[in-house]
Amino acid sequence: MRAALRGRIGLYMQLIRWDRPAGWLLLLWPTLTALWIAADGWPGWHLLLVFCLGTVLMRSAGCCVNDVADRDFDRHVKRTANRPVTRGALTVKQALRFGAMLALLAFLLVLTTNAPTIALSFAALAVALLYPYAKRWLAMPQAVLGLAFSFGIPMAFSAALGGTQWSLAAVNAAVPLSAWALLLTNMFWVLAYDTEYAMVDRDDDIHLAIKTSAVTLGRFDVAAVMGFYVIHLAGWTALGLRLGLGRIFLAGIALAALQALWHYFLIRSRSRDGCFKAFRSNHWLGFAIFAGGALDLGLR
């Protein structure tokens, strides 16, 4: 009985990629950077816990939806063929029920913040549900993923700066234009690392007629990835300086740039192992920017 229960729990842990924290770290670092900037330093334990736990829960819920949406494709891809829903170890209903429960827990956390953040959470959920199906229609579905993975930025600003009113004006007041600019800039980082991820499965995706940025960009994929990194880092630098960050933040940007340069040497040969290693290490790039921003604000 206990062995069966452990096996069932293990399947759900596989479903949400519990053994691969890089996925939720990619969401977490830009969200926390925005939270520190919005709060002008330490945001307090409440908001920190809301956004850390909420990020893990929503990324996990997204994995449930993604695996259901892609189950017919995943069985033809070596890297994904053994996922619980794909191989039939969990049913579609079980995966969706678990994902819904995780999303509900995340929403309960959002309810402890304020009205503008709650309003934004509905838009964030809609984008998260849209992404798994975007690859059916869009040549660059990673742009939709970029929006989904960056929505924590305006939510962090609204949680730190928002009031109690339920209106569009209240959301506009809580989320300045600089927050939306950070979201747009962060989308280019998602385009960079998810194109690296797509390069791993390019041959399989071409065979299955799945649209990804790696397929769309073709032989310009490596150049495009590096261009995405440049736009991302230049954007965060300009906006960080505009928002009052200084030398320590710039040191974090410099460390992030060195990591992006290292990724060029990992992906230039387009080997599966090199591209996957570049993707999985991207959370350190995000951490460098967060650490630079948090230290800069904390040591004033």
Image: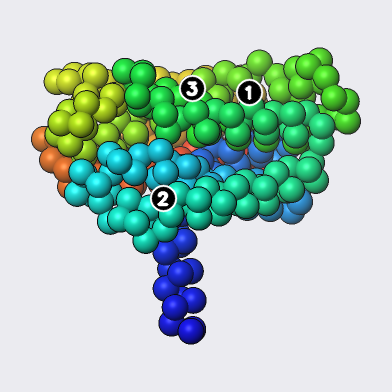
> Is residue 65 in view?
yes
Q: Which amino acid does label 1 sit on?
A: Ala
Residue 248 seen in render: no
Rounded to the nearest angstrom, the CA distance separating label 2 from label 3 is: 20 Å
Q: How crowded is mark 3: few (under 14 residues within 10 Å), some or many (20 or more)?
A: many
Residue where numbered disc 2 is placed: 22
* Residue under numbered circle 1: 179
Vertical arrangement, residue 178 with respect to residue 119, above or below = above
Residue density around tag 2, few if under 14, some if 14–19, many if 20 or more, within 10 Å: some
The residue depicted at 49 percent of the width and 76 percent of the height is: 5
Q: Earlier in the sequence, mark 2 or mark 3?
A: 2
Instruction: Relative to 11, say whether 143 is above or below.
Output: above
Label 3 to label 1, Cα distance in Å?
10 Å
- Tag 1 or tag 3, which sits nearer the N-term? 1
User: Disc 3 vs disc 1: Cβ atoms closer than 8 Å?
Assistant: no
Determine whether the residue tagged by mark 2 lies in a helix, strand or loop.
helix
Residue sitting at x 38%, y 53%: 85
Q: Name the residue under label 3.
A: 185
For the residue pair 241 and 269, the one nearer the viewer reads as 269
Q: Hey, which quadrant is residue 117 in on the image?
A: top right
Residue 219 in the image: above or below residue 292: above
Q: Is residue 2 above or below residue 228?
A: below
The amino acid at mark 3 is Thr
Q: Is residue 279 left or right of residue 95?
A: left
